[in-house]
């Protein structure tokens, strides 16, 4: 069988919350041995927040942690202790990549900055993720995903007509920076293979998020204007919106017509062929000018029907349509199940639970979720004995001294 892309690569993982763990998750998906450094004294926030399996709180039962730590190992250490710092340095000496997403300068104050790591292992690759980067006048500001969204201008273009900027409902900066960090690690590995040298990647959430704003940035750069907030509408296409369907408040379907032919097909599918020649809707310019009236007509049709019936009818007619999906819809989706995207690995404490898996397939290299997320400290003995070669007596001394806590 072919090797997984990062098989044989070891990652020392100091990450927490979302951006860093999402970065190392991609590495685990590609076959790297990712070893998380954790502590009872300062648990990762992702182990502490809902949702919990069976609604029973516990550090090993948090869905947030268990989603983004699949395939990883957990080493429990109290990094405030000199002995733990020594263990960590020994692990780094046997690693290829170190990933951290503390605030700027924090890892240096811990005695584990890049200059120190280079002394331990000259070709080490370090990925540092924080809100605003390791340098610059705003480096000391705390950086979280929710704050990066408005700072990147995304909130300014999100919302409905005649209403102020809106929350987008997700901390886009975190997963975006995580993916960028994983990509940068691949580039750094390639560079190391070619030159024998390591590197330090300085990655800012804010900058990683700006790539989602090309139209708005170019609009201002070229025209000195900014896009208007317009809900789910498109600047040119009409209809282009999310329409209420039969059922509770979660039942909606998105419909979009890219040209006049699709609009005419929609009219036929709705049983209202006369709308195709109605002067209010005769072309896209007219439809945009009378969009409110148009959407009222479509809503009167969709609200009496099941969203999947609307979807099937319109797709057969060549009109783009698809329901808005809930978490339950996704977890039970037959297409995602058929592709093996939804995975259930046995977890030592909570058994099998549905998790999002790997969103890619490689024809010549197997990538699949290997294990469920680890219990906190589950692999402490493995790392100390098998990776670092410590004796039973040495491990016992650390445990008796509360270093492994």
Image (cartoon, rainbow, N blue to C red):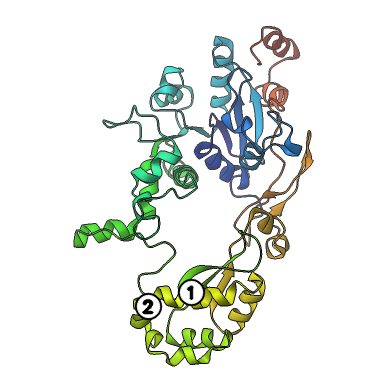
Quarter of the N terminus within the rendering: bottom right
CA gap between label 2 and label 1 equals 10 Å
Q: Is residue 210 left or right of residue 54?
A: left
Closer to us: 303 or 269: 303
Q: Residue at x 41, y 50 (%)?
A: 166
Q: Is residue 282 left or right of residue 137?
A: right
Residue 18 drawn at (x, y percent): 53, 38
Between 309 and 16, the residue placed more toward the observer is: 309
Location of residue 149 in the rendering, given as x and y in whole percent from the top left corner: 40, 45
Q: Earlier in the sequence, mark 2 or mark 1?
A: 2
Residue 388 falls in image quadrant: top right
Give the residue drawn at x 46%, y 28%. 102
Compared with 292, 56 (above or below) is: above
Could you say whether the residue bearing mark 2 is in a helix, strand or loop?
A: loop
Q: Residues within 10 Å of mark 2 (few under 14, many from 20)?
A: some
Residue 329: image tag = none
Q: How many marks?
A: 2
Provide the secondary structure element on which disc 1 rests. helix
Front-most of residues 172 and 162: 162
Q: Which residue is mark 2?
A: 290
Which residue is located at x 58 percent, y 11 percent? Answer: 83
Q: Which residue is mark 1?
A: 296
């Amino acid at each position: 069988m072919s090797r997984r892309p990062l098989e044989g690569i070891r990652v020392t993982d100091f990450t927490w919350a979302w951006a860093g763990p999402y970065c190392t998750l991609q590495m685990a998906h590609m076959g790297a041995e990712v070893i998380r450094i954790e502590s009872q004294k300062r648990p990762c926030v992702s182990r502490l927040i809902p949702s919990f399996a069976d609604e029973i709180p516990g550090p090993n039962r948090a869905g947030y942690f268990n989603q983004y730590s699949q395939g990883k190992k957990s080493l429990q250490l109290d990094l405030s202790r000199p002995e733990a710092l020594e263990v960590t340095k020994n692990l780094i000496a046997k690693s290829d990549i170190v990933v951290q997403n503390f605030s700027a300068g924090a890892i240096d104050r811990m005695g584990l900055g890049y200059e120190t790591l280079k002394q331990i292992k000259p070709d080490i690759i370090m990925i540092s993720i924080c809100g605003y980067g390791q340098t610059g006048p705003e480096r000391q500001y705390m950086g979280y995903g929710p704050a990066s969204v408005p700072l990147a201008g995304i909130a300014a273009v999100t919302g409905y007509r005649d209403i102020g900027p809106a929350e987008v409902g997700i901390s886009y900066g975190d997963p975006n920076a995580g993916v960028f960090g994983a990509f940068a690690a691949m580039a750094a590995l390639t560079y190391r293979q070619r030159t024998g040298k390591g590197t330090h990647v300085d990655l800012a959430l804010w900058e990683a998020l700006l790539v989602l704003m090309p139209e708005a940035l170019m609009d201002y750069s070229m025209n000195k204007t900014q896009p208007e907030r317009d809900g789910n509408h498109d600047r040119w296409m009409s209809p282009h919106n999310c329409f209420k369907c039969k059922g509770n408040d979660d039942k909606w379907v998105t419909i979009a017509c890219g040209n006049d032919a699709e609009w005419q097909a929609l009219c036929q599918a709705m049983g209202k062929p006369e709308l195709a020649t109605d002067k209010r809707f005769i072309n896209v310019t007219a439809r945009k000018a009378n969009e409110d009236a148009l959407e009222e007509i479509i809503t009167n049709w969709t609200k009496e029907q099941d969203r999947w019936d609307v979807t099937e009818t319109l797709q057969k007619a060549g009109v783009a349509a698809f329901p808005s999906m809930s978490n339950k819809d996704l977890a039970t989706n037959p297409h995602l199940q058929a592709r093996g995207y939804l995975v259930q690995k046995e977890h030592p404490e909570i058994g099998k639970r549905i998790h999002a898996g790997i969103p890619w397939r490689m024809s010549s290299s197997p990538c699949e979720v290997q294990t469920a997320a680890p219990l906190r400290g589950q692999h402490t003995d493995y790392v100390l004995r098998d990776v670092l070669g410590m004796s039973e007596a040495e491990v016992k001394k650390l445990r008796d001294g509360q270093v492994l806590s």
